[in-house]
Image (spheres, rainbow, N blue to C red):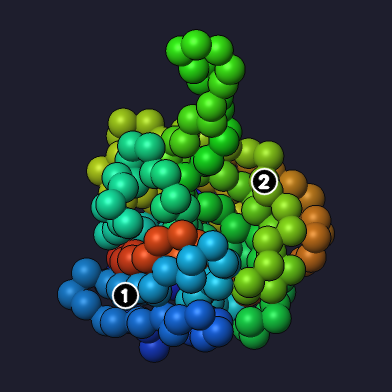
Amino acid sequence: MSYSGQLYFPCKQSQFTLVGGTAHSTASYTDTQFGVNISKATNGNNNEIATMLVSAPSTPYSVIAKVVWNGMNQNGTTMFGDPGPAESACGMCFTNGTATSSKLKVLRWGNLNGALTVNVNGGGTAPLNLFGFAAADQYSNYTTEVGNGSGEQHCPPTMGMGFVWMKLRDDGTNCKYYLSCDGMSWQQIYSEARTTYFTATNVGVYVNPYGSNANMVCQSFQVVNA
């Protein structure tokens, strides 16, 4: 694969279209020496996404981002252990526009609450909350989730240090969702027809402070025209 295309490193907010809901809180976008810091205060048990977007190029293409999750401890819980009520997330997204009414399909980095169960001493089971990745969660707008993705990957030790590379690919037939611990070796966790739910016109990164504050840095962002 040719890695020709635009590379933003470190990212600057002026390179993106910034979109975010304000009903519960307003996202803060800050240029730093490491990239763009996106932070958004918790919405309680409400979704309200904030994004940084670019226009989707002609297929085939890939978009690669290195993201750093800053909010390791939130609401008195540890994000890499049992998160309890903290279900904030960050990651990458396809969208069909640049308004808060736009639909989204996301590669989510956050808590896979209830993905597994464990036996409870004395009988019964309880949900096991694990940190990991899911694709492709669907949103009908920036506040309404309408479907959970069927691709899940629990966070391996190499991706447990607070940063990860993510890749979204549209090859003209399918949209594919990838993870990497080094930006070179990729693991595909999900694939779907590119017209599933909608056909993307924009792509980028996002945060969703559901249940706890969200704080992420997008360090690098690359569009690969191949």
**Mark 2 nearby-residue class (10 Å; few <14, some 14–19, many ≥20):** some
Q: Which quarter of the picture shows residue 32?
A: bottom left
Q: Which mark is residue 9?
A: none
Q: Residue at x 44, y 50 (%)?
A: 85
User: Which residue in the protein does label 1 denote?
Assistant: 36
Residue farthest to the left, as pictured? 33
Which of pointers 1 and 2 indicates the residue nearer the eye?
A: 2
The image quadrant of residue 220 is: bottom left
State whether residue 3 appears in this view: no
Secondary structure of the residue carrying tag 1 is strand
Type of residue at label 1?
Val
First in sequence, mark 1 or 2: give its number. 1
Going 44% across and 84% down the picture, which residue do you hit?
26
Q: Is residue 23 left or right of residue 101?
A: left
Question: For mark 1, does the 10 Å Cα neighbourhood hold few (<14), some (14 to 19), or many (20 or more) residues?
Answer: many
The residue at the far front in this view is: 122
**Front residue of this view, candidates 82 and 150:** 82
Q: Which mark is residue 149?
A: 2
Q: Quadrant of the C terminus?
A: bottom right
- Residue type at tag 2: Gly
